[in-house]
Image (cartoon, rainbow, N blue to C red):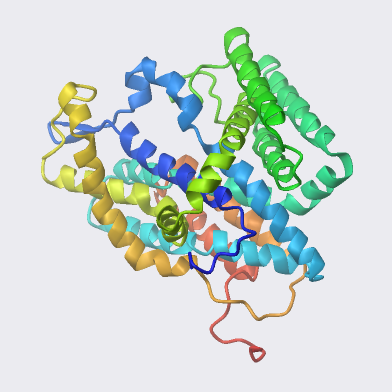
Amino acid sequence: MADATPESRNRVVDLVRVASILVVVFGHWLMAAVTFDDGEIVPGHLLELADWTHPLTWVFQVMPLFFFVGGYSNALSWRSARKRDEPYGTWLRARLRRLALPVVPLLIVWMVGGWIGLRLGVDWEILQLASQVALVPTWFLAAYVVIVTLAPPALWLWERFGWWSIAAGIAFAGLADFLSIGAGVVWVGFLNYVLVWGTVHQLGYAWVDDRLAGRARRAALAAVGLGMTLALVRFGPYPVAMVGLDTAQITNSYPPRVTLTFLGLFQAGSILLMEPILGRWMSRPRPWTAVVAISSRIMTLFLWHLTAMVIVIGLGLVTDGRGFGIEPLSPTWWLTRPIWFAVLLVPTALLIVVFGRYERPERDPRSAPAWWRPVIAVALVCAGLGLLAAIGIADEDGLNGLVLSLPIVGVVVGGVSRSPWPREPATV
């Protein structure tokens, strides 16, 4: 795959995507400061235990970068579909097959595991906490799927209005924050899942159209982003940490705030300033092959890495906290983090071997669906994933089977998955 890469491909896009996911994976693992007290789990979060780590999230909160490179890729993909006269329904279904199908095995495993756990007497609160931790990646996936669904009309806005479309997105995101935080209309803030991430996604359109060419423009983009983020944190109601904390009254990420839009400008400008250097590095066979290898299983790694961590913590639970007796943030705790990562990589690798096959679905030969069918899939998938990230798989009434089933029903009803018994013969 690495050798077959065309010269026209912007390999920096793939590098940034892979690097972003790796930062997310190792960042999640590092944030877990779990200990046991008399056989009971004592959850801890690095950012809550050490305030000095909060400024570091300006670098390690990489979700804006993922939407940035997503805009680049989705612009190329939709424009290619337009040239082929491919309908929106076909294009969206193909995107959902790459994004939504890999999450189905994860949900089935948690559904079966949760059902068995409840029958064996596992406390529902433990299952709820474990599943909320393990399914954290699903809230991001839900947000990204929504932005992908809106990518074609968003690209039209960019092609029609250019930078004004980005300026409008920032303005509306700021207005949503004002109404949500200042006026107490809390629900308006959740519109920023579209406004904030959609605006950063628009930056990817500017990149693909060479509207961010030249060091001066890229430096200006980074400077504006950094300056506005600093100003909002210094003079506004926003906290320093760009990652959500349960102890904070207002967070920058739940729902996303306009601060993340400006952080995206800063991160995008910084990456673009390094693009020539990164491009030359990606022209070398070994680093590019590594990027291609990780990319081939990147969704599986992203979706399952926290389930792997829950498995390891679960083993600690049944062994009376063996291996979890080190005081978080102590010198020994920091020195043993590489060992912690190595331990977590073992079940993660096994899960990738087992479930990685679902990441690359076979070519779909079916005829074009009506546009509304994959949109229904988006609605059901995102509703289910969002609820699971918020409430987990279990409550006092038992397993949340309906919520767990919503994404699965979505990919079936929306025609994303292929029936094993097709009504019409497959075409070659």
Work out whether residue 109 can be spotted: yes
Q: Residue at x 63, y 88 (%)?
A: 426
- Position of 213 compared to 130: left or right? right
Q: Residue at x 80, y 31 (%)?
A: 168
The residue lying toward the viewer, choosing from 111 and 414, is 414
**From what the image shows, is residue 157 above or below residue 292?**
above
- The image shows residue 186 at horizontal and vertical percentages of 65, 25
Work out whether residue 186 can be spotted: no
The furthest residue to the bottom: 425
The residue lying toward the viewer, choosing from 57 and 277, is 277
Q: Residue at x 47, y 63 (%)?
A: 104
- Position of 230 compared to 92: left or right? left
- The image shows residue 371 at horizontal and vertical percentages of 77, 65
- The image shows residue 251 at horizontal and vertical percentages of 53, 23
- The image shows residue 89 at horizontal and vertical percentages of 74, 66
Can you tell which quarter of the image residue 132 is in? top left
- Position of 162 compared to 238: left or right? right
